[in-house]
Image: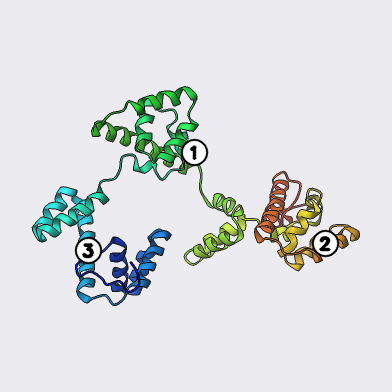
Amino acid sequence: MRPGQKLPKQVEDLSGVAKAAILMLALEHESARSILRELPAEMVEEITRVLASLGEVPKDLSDQVVDEYYTLRMASLYAKEGGLEYATMLLKGSLDPAVADRVISQIQTQVQKAPFAFLQKAESENLLTFIQDEHPQTISLIVSHLPHHMASEILVGLPEQKQIEVVRRVANMEQTNPDVIRQVESGLEARLSNMLIHSMEKVGGVETVAEMLNLCDRTTEKSILEGIEAEDPDLVEQIRRLMFVFEDILLVNDKGIQSVLKEVDNDELILAMKTSSDELKDKIFNNMSARAAELIKEDMEYMGAVRLSDVEAAQQRIVDIVRRLEESGEIIISGRGGAQDVVV
């Protein structure tokens, strides 16, 4: 919609994005924000662009948009609770026939999902692992209902003989009985569900979260922990106790620091210390020779601008060394089987 473009008088003449933009204007700010938070970023951008171009919206048109949204929302609930036929019966009994037909047509696309839709959100590599042992006829049925780029990635990952069998079956495939598709889809969905439940029994927990966050960049880690802390500060404390970040090298004893430094190149160390605290720098310098410390300080002084991502990557590589040495028992980290836990 172009800036200043005159709006039509009837809601059916508006585009979907224009309807969404007018709805955002009609709703209270918090309600509008709640809806936008649930939408993909590219859709929010499109709605915002139309919002910026809207002039004055006639009250009658705004009311029509709100009424249509409410009707569609209620129709979707009817369809989910009692099915499409039940929703159709209610709509035709309560709305103008032309309006009812339009609403029914719109909710049909929402209720009737494409076959194997639950597989389309999976990564191709994971999907390949999941279906590669299926019969070629089953695989051909699945890839025929996947987006072409996903189907291609699945095909490339199959053994050569199975590739040939699948392609031949896809090429010769005619209209498939919907009942057969539903049976295959239902069986796969049940198996996938069981596999996920089994996986959840074996993994998870605070330890897993700590390991995951240790591998995240600092910004993501901070954002996630702050988000959790607002609702569950005790959980965040548990996670942080299990995590180890570059600054935590302060908790490593002197002998451990010396062991770590033997495995770290000076260039990597210089880059990693670019954003570290003075306290950590002093601890590291105190565990190397005066000459080596002086050379590193000089190199750091003349170091130009570097990417933060490179610094964090260097820090993570050193953290990985610390964690490996700790796991092998070669170094001690205070608070994690450290000095206060040692008895003599």
Between 265 and 200, which is closer to the camera in this rendering? 265
Residue 40 falls in which quadrant of the image? Answer: bottom left
Residue at 57% x, 59% y is 221
- Residue 154 location in percent, x, y? 45, 34
Mark 1 neighbour class, 10 Å CA radius: few under 14, some 14 to 19, many 20 or more = few
- Residue 210 location in percent, x, y? 58, 53
Task: Indicate which label's residue lies in the foreground, 1 or 3.
Answer: 3
Separation of residues labelled 1 and 3 (CA atoms): 43 Å
> Which of the labelled discs sits on residue 299, or is there none?
2
Between 170 and 117, which is closer to the camera in this rendering? 170
**Mark 2: amino acid:** Asp
**Mark 1: amino acid:** Glu
62 left or right, relative to 223: left
Residue at 78% x, 59% y is 270
Residue 188 falls in which quadrant of the image? Answer: top left
Between 307 and 212, which is closer to the camera in this rendering? 307
**Mark 3: amino acid:** Asp
In which quadrant will I find the N terminus? bottom left
> Which of the labelled discs sits on residue 108, or is there none?
none
Mark 3 neighbour class, 10 Å CA radius: few under 14, some 14 to 19, many 20 or more = few
Separation of residues labelled 3 and 2 (CA atoms): 67 Å
Element at label 1: helix
> Which of the labelled discs sits on residue 125, or is there none?
1
Asked whether disc 1 touches disc 3, contact meaning CB atoms under 8 Å apart, the reply is no
- Residue 155 location in percent, x, y? 45, 32
Between 170 and 178, which is closer to the camera in this rendering? 170
For this orientation, the residue located farthest to the right is 291
- Residue 120 location in percent, x, y? 39, 43
Asked whether disc 3 touches disc 2, contact meaning CB atoms under 8 Å apart, the reply is no
Residue 185 in view (yes/no): yes
Where does label 3 land, which residue? 13
Which of pointers 3 and 2 lies earlier in the amino acid sequence?
3
